[in-house]
Image (cartoon, grey):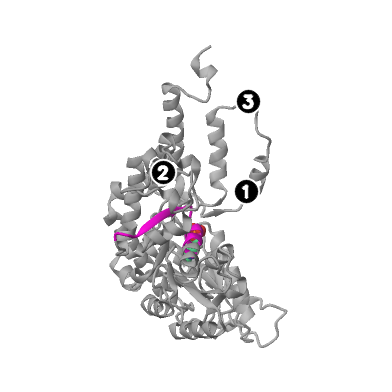
């Protein structure tokens, strides 16, 4: 019996090469086809999912067949690695990072405890340090790479709670806004903060937190015997990319003795650009920062980062002694990541950040992000020219808009009903999506239905954005013409077909 038959879990060199080549061929073909794949393919996804519900096989089957299954699976739903993915906050999926993931899995080094992999742990620590440098954090800053922004926000809140409140924390209060990402309130609840103690501070017309209102709320809570311990600012909200007045919030939090966390999951990487740095001014004052390399650093999904100005506080909140780790010495120069994070064993995720930055250089990322900022400006200008309501000039790359001439009477039937605009824009979004070249998403801001375009992917360039703008214009004109020809019979007031 050959080794390959006796130990099928250990392919020999020839098989390693063959399997690798099959996977590379898959990657090459997928990346080649990516621009032409529909941005969203709703057909057949559930059927395929149904066919994938099956018991585990006792015997294996050949790789090519399995790759065919994966090929089909990759084509249903959203093409989230493609240039037309402009919904939510897009990611990217750098090829270099995919290779890094492959290599990390092949080496399977144990990076959570530095002595077991000193150089690989250092590669990760170096990549984290680069992120700290981006925000001008001091030498004592520490950070962890998480699975995403939600987990980074969670560890930030636990650190703040531990540092500011100690073990008895049910009287602690947290300050966010209606525009703050839901993962922050969720993390606060998971960290044991009572739901009623997560306060929504009012925002101004720019959808950014009002620092004076924050100060008043903190003062009221303090007088009521509560302990305000955490202010969460946003550096790029998901809805519109709004950036809170970080310098002012840092000052208010500082006067109150509260921790200042900045959720820059989406906006953080724009710090690489001159415009981004200007818009994120004050972020360097934060006690902690969340940023997601799997958004605007274009990495594949599965990597967020938490940076903490005083690294000792991050460690204090997450450190735990364990007898079975006694042979491993204290950290010296290289951190034991397990002491800073809820996780012990995990993937070597630092490599997927380190390799692309070393390979391409930060300049390549900077230029790509500048391109996204330009594209968002283009979207803003063109939509306004076309007569759309685009209330917020993008501070980053998210643009929210709707068709609402005359304050919401989109179908031109003259009743000025806000519900008209909501229904009109929902149908507009459906038609734009049906064209298959771009996937957008929608949200509600101040009670109004808004369509969102968010340009983040490294693969989205001007040609795709121009195409999208044409499609939006055409779809809107088409819909207005239809509404004008056949006004909704449910509505009364003088239909004015001529208006549309
Ligand atoms: C995406 C996002 C999050 C959540 O991050 P995940 O990586 O999805 O867990 C948090 N805050 C903001 C502002 C985001 O855009």
Residue 292 in sight: no
Residue at (48%, 82%) from the top-left corner?
214
Secondary structure beneath disc 1? helix
Secondary structure beneath disc 2? loop
Q: Which stretch is magenta?
A: 139-157
Please tell me whether mark 1 or mark 3 is closer to you in this view.
3
Which residue was labeled with disc 1? 45
Q: Is residue 152 magenta?
A: yes
Please tell me whether mark 2 or mark 3 is closer to you in this view.
2
Where is residue 146 drawn, in percent x and y? 46, 53
Circle 1 residues within 10 Å: few <14, some 14–19, many ≥20: some
Residue 244 vs residue 298, the one in the foreground: 244
Instruction: State the image quarter where residue 62 is shown.
Output: top right
Where is residue 473 drawn, in percent x and y? 48, 70
Going from N to C along the chain, the mark reached first, 1 or 3, is 1
Residue 395 in sight: yes
Which residue was labeled with disc 3? 59
State the separation of the CA atoms marked 2 and 3. Answer: 37 Å
Left or right: 47, with 326 as reference point: right
State the separation of the CA atoms marked 1 and 3. Answer: 27 Å
Where is residue 409 drawn, in percent x and y? 59, 83
Residues at circles 1 and 2 in contact by the CB criterion of under 8 Å: no
Residues at circles 2 and 3 in contact by the CB criterion of under 8 Å: no
State the separation of the CA atoms marked 1 and 2. Answer: 42 Å
Please tell me whether mark 1 or mark 2 is closer to you in this view.
2
Circle 3 residues within 10 Å: few <14, some 14–19, many ≥20: few
Going from N to C along the chain, the mark reached first, 1 or 2, is 1
Secondary structure beneath disc 3? loop
Question: Does the Cβ of the disc 2 residue fall within 8 Å of ligand 1?
Answer: no
Residues at circles 1 and 3 in contact by the CB criterion of under 8 Å: no
Where is residue 400 drawn, in percent x and y? 48, 72
Which residue was labeled with disc 2? 113
């Amino acid at each position: 019996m050959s080794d390959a038959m006796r130990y099928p879990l250990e392919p020999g060199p020839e098989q390693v090469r063959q399997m690798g080549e099959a996977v590379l061929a898959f990657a090459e073909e997928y990346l080649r086809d990516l621009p032409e794949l529909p941005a969203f393919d709703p057909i057949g996804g559930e059927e395929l999912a149904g066919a994938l519900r099956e018991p585990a096989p006792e015997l294996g089957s050949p790789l090519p067949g399995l790759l065919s299954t994966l090929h089909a699976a990759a084509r249903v739903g959203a093409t989230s690695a493609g240039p037309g993915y402009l919904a939510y906050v897009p990611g990217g999926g750098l090829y270099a990072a995919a290779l890094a993931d492959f290599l990390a899995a092949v080496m399977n080094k144990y990076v959570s405890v530095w002595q077991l992999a000193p150089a690989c742990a250092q590669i990760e620590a170096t990549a984290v340090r680069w992120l700290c440098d981006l925000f001008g954090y001091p030498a004592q800053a520490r950070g962890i790479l998480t699975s995403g922004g939600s987990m980074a926000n969670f560890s930030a809140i636990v650190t703040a709670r531990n540092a500011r409140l100690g073990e008895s924390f049910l009287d602690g209060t947290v300050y966010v806004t209606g525009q703050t990402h839901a993962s922050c309130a969720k993390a606060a609840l998971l960290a044991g903060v009572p739901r009623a103690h997560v306060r929504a501070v009012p925002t101004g017309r720019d959808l950014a937190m009002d620092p004076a209102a924050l100060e008043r709320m903190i003062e009221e809570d303090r007088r009521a015997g509560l302990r305000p311990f955490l202010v969460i600012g946003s550096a790029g909200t998901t809805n519109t990319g709004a950036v809170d007045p970080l310098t002012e919030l840092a000052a208010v939090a500082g006067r109150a003795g509260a921790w200042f966390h900045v959720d820059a999951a989406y906006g953080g990487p724009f710090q690489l650009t001159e415009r981004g740095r200007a818009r994120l001014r004050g972020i360097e004052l934060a006690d902690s920062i969340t940023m997601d390399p799997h958004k605007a650093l274009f990495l594949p999904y599965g990597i967020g980062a938490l940076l903490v100005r005083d690294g000792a506080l991050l460690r204090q909140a997450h450190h735990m002694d364990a007898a079975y780790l006694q042979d491993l010495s204290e950290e010296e120069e290289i951190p034991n990541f397990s002491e800073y994070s809820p996780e012990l064993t995990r993937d070597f995720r630092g490599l997927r950040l380190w390799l692309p930055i070393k390979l391409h250089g930060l300049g390549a990322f900077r230029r790509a992000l500048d391109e996204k900022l330009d594209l968002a400006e283009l979207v803003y200008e063109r939509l306004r020219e076309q007569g759309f309501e685009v209330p917020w000039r993008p501070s980053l790359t998210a643009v929210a808009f709707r068709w609402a001439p005359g304050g919401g009477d989109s179908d031109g039937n003259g009743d000025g009903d806000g519900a008209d605009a909501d229904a009109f824009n929902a149908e507009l979004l459906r038609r734009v999506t049906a064209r298959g070249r771009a996937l957008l998403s929608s949200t509600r801001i101040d009670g109004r239905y808004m369509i969102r375009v968010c340009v983040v992917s490294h693969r989205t360039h001007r040609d795709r954005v121009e195409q999208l703008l044409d499609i939006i214009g055409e779809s809107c004109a088409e819909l207005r013409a239809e509404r004008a020809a056949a006004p909704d019979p449910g509505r009364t007031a003088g239909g004015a077909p001529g208006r549309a």
